[in-house]
Image (cartoon, helix red, strand yellow):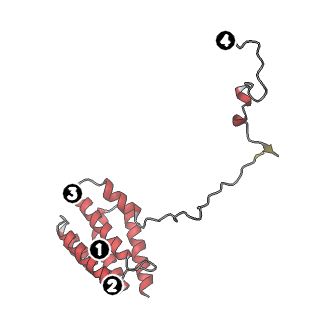
Amino acid sequence: MGGNTEGVKLPPSRARTDPGRHPARRRPSRSAGRVRTLPAVHSTPPYGVAPLRFPTPALATLVGRAGLGGAREVALAMFVAARLARSVLPPTALDVRVRHTRATAARTWAAALMLPPDVRVPVARLLDATGAADPGDVANAVRASLLAVTRYLNESSVVELEALHAALARSAR
């Protein structure tokens, strides 16, 4: 029987088809001049974890892409401060004692950064305010630090911090 298969007829299921007519390469059926499409099904399995929404992606991107030096240090300090300020907001609000401990540690960490003098004080006040019980104090501190750091951040990072300020102000009412 060798390797010569000329003249041998393959069963229809194994017969070669024209590449243009291959079932995987069919054109979508057209109905009244329109292409029929099926809706995509996006479901989370019952055992799956819900996707997390990162609260400040633009600020994190700025920290990751900025060169070493002043702008990166300011962005990093605001990133940490924004994460601490978010811990005041429900539904993930942390206990005041935990926030106070984190704020104290963050203040010590921020003292080691080379922040410009006009930024150092508002950021330190923001870090201190995140340890307090009142979201209104945190909102005011976010606003004050935002005014000081705006020139070091890009537009989308400023928008994220303004949204954080607005959320804290709503929570304070």
Name the residue beneath numbered marker 3.
Answer: 69
Q: CA distance from mark 1 to mark 4?
A: 83 Å
Where is residue 118 drawn, in percent x and y? 20, 71
The circle drawn on residue 96 is 2
Q: Could you tell me the amino acid type at mark 1?
A: Ser
Query: Earlier along the polypeptide chain: callout 2 or callout 1?
Result: 2
Q: Could you tell me the amino acid type at mark 3?
A: Gly
Query: Earlier along the polypeptide chain: callout 4 or callout 3?
Result: 4
Name the residue beneath numbered marker 1.
Answer: 145
The circle drawn on residue 2 is 4
Q: Could you tell me the amino acid type at mark 2?
A: Val
Query: Earlier along the polypeptide chain: callout 1 or callout 4?
Result: 4
Q: CA distance from mark 3 to mark 1?
A: 19 Å
Q: CA distance from mark 2 to mark 1?
A: 22 Å
- The residue lying toward the viewer, choosing from 140 and 109, is 109
Question: Callout 2 environment at 10 Å: few (<14), some (14 to 19), or many (20+)?
Answer: some
Q: Which residue occupies 74% across, 30% down?
A: 21
Seen as rendered, the residue at the extreme right is 32
Question: Callout 1 environment at 10 Å: few (<14), some (14 to 19), or many (20+)?
Answer: many
Q: Which residue occupies 33% across, 76% down?
A: 142
Q: Could you tell me the amino acid type at mark 4?
A: Gly
Question: Callout 3 environment at 10 Å: few (<14), some (14 to 19), or many (20+)?
Answer: few
Mark 1 vs mark 4: give the one in front.
4
Circles 4 and 3: CB atoms closer than 8 Å: no
Q: CA distance from mark 3 to mark 2?
A: 33 Å
